[in-house]
Structures are given as structure tokens and as C-alpha cells.
Image (cartoon, rainbow, N blue to C red):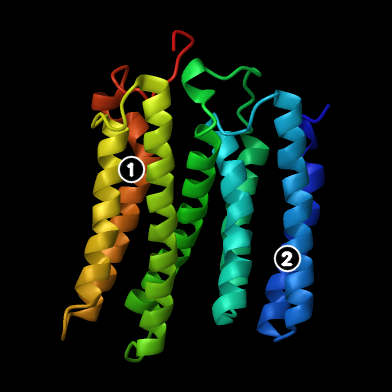
Amino acid sequence: MITWEHFIFFAIPAVLLWMVGAWAAWKKRERLAYTTTVTGLLVFFAFIAAMWISLERPPLRTMGETRLWYSFFLPLAGIIVYSRWRYKWILSFSTLLAVVFICVNLFKPEIHDKTLMPALQSPWFAPHVIVYMFAYAVLGAATVMALYLLFFKKRGITNEEFDITDNLVYVGLAFMTFGMLFGSLWAKEAWGHYWSWDPKETWAAITWFAYLVYIHYRRVPKHNGRLALGVLLISFVLLQMCWWGINYLPSAQGASVHTYSTSK
């Protein structure tokens, strides 16, 4: 039976493979970049699948388990973006950020019991969380690009660099939209209604509109590019509030349907 104690035996080989893939991307050795990155993803997903079988439920309940998916989807998003636009830096970024989440899980795996609360047993729960994790990974890449353009780019920002950021936001927002739709179907089955303006749902809507503001502002003629990137950074902060910051707000303590206990 696979437990969190076995995680390191999957994580280290996966990270080493992703690092080779990132190096290969910089050296323009595309075949090696694809092969090692995909192999690393397969190794990492093998642990997720084994945990799924061992827990007798999808590993999506706790922050530790969602970090597991985030660690997986970052390199997946990286290889997809690399295959589409050939951004050499994307595999390095996705690997670095995945390593951060993997290290957190190595030191704080958050082991819980095997059961899921009734509200989490809907077939829509797994796709809702999985799609959201992929969206978070892509929007995280867009945020890194925005930080680079705002604070580290020494010369003027080119249209190509803005296109990179825009494309990442388009993909991330599309998956976020699908995640919200899956979430509404889950809510209907679990609680009898599609939307209740629960604190979590409210912040999800705020985040979605913030990214939509960025997209529309970018289409305004003669817009301020740096202001647009600032909007993008604010959107990512709102995303963090939606993902985990909401857990620390008084409005979500006990009143939120996204706060699970044995009575639900």
C-alpha cells in the first residue's frame, strides 16, 4: 500500500527528469525536453494514482493533496506551453515551482483518513479541482512573466513578450471557467443549488472578473502596458485568496459550505 512515506521515491526521480527537460529546452534539444519531461510526469502521476487507490478516493481533499496535483500540473502546463510557443524558460519555471510544492509536501504531507465527506463524493468534485489546479499552474506562469516584464526587463516591453503573457492568461482563464462550471454542477448535486455566494464562491467570481478585466483592458487602444501587468499581479493575489487565503477569513469560519467537517 502506497503512503506519503513513499512520496520521496517518486518525487526525486520526477524532479531530476524535469530538470533535464528544462536544461534540454534551453539547449534547443526538443526531443530530449519532451521525453524527460513527459517521463517525469508519468513517474509523478504513478504516485498520484497509487495514492488514489490506497486512499480509496481521489487525493483532492486537503491542501497537501491539492499541492500534489499542483506539483503535477505545473510541468504539464509547462510542456504544453513549450510545445505550442517554444518558450525556453517555461520548463525551468514550472520545474522550480513544482519543486517548491514538492518540498512543502515532503515536510508537511498532511495525512488524513480515507473517507470523503458526503459533499465531496460527487463525480463533479474531481474534475472541478483538477481543472482548477491546471488553471492555477498556467496563471502562475503568466504571473512570473508579468513580474519579469515589470521589474527585471531593462528595455521596453515588446509585443511578443506581451503576447506570451496574454496567451497564458487566455489558457488559464479558459480552464478556470471550466472549473467554475464543474463546480456549479457539483454544488447543485451536493447542496441543491448552482451558486450561493458562499465566501469561496464570491472570491472565485472576483478572481474570474479580475482576469477578465485584464483581457479587456489589453484590447483598449493605447492602453498602459505597465498598468495592465499590475492588474494581472493583483488578479493573482486574488487567486491566492480564493485558493487558500479564504480559510483565514472570519466570514468563512463555520459558515462556508466549503468548510468540511464530519457532520457534512
Say which element carries label 1: helix
Q: Which label was assigned to residue 241?
A: 1
Number of residues whose C-alpha sits closer than 10 Å to that of mark 2, classed few (under 14), some (14–19) or many (20 or more):
many
Against 115, is 13 above or below? below
Towards the viewer: 173 or 185: 185
Say which element carries label 2: helix
**Which residue in the protein does label 2 denote?**
37
Question: In x, y percent, where is residue 79?
Answer: 63, 68
Q: Residue at x 29, y 57 (%)?
A: 235
Q: CA distance from mark 1 to mark 2?
A: 30 Å
Q: Residue at x 73, y 74 (%)?
A: 33
Which quarter of the figure has residue 149? bottom left
Is residue 51 found left or right of 204 in the rendered image?
right
Question: In x, y percent, where is residue 147?
Answer: 38, 70
Disc nearer the start of the sequence (1/2): 2
Number of residues whose C-alpha sits closer than 10 Å to that of mark 1, classed few (under 14), some (14–19) or many (20 or more):
some
Q: Point out the image quarter for the C terminus.
A: top left
Question: In x, y percent, where is residue 17?
Answer: 77, 63
Amino acid type assigned to the residue bearing label 1 in the image: Met
Which quarter of the figure has residue 55? top right
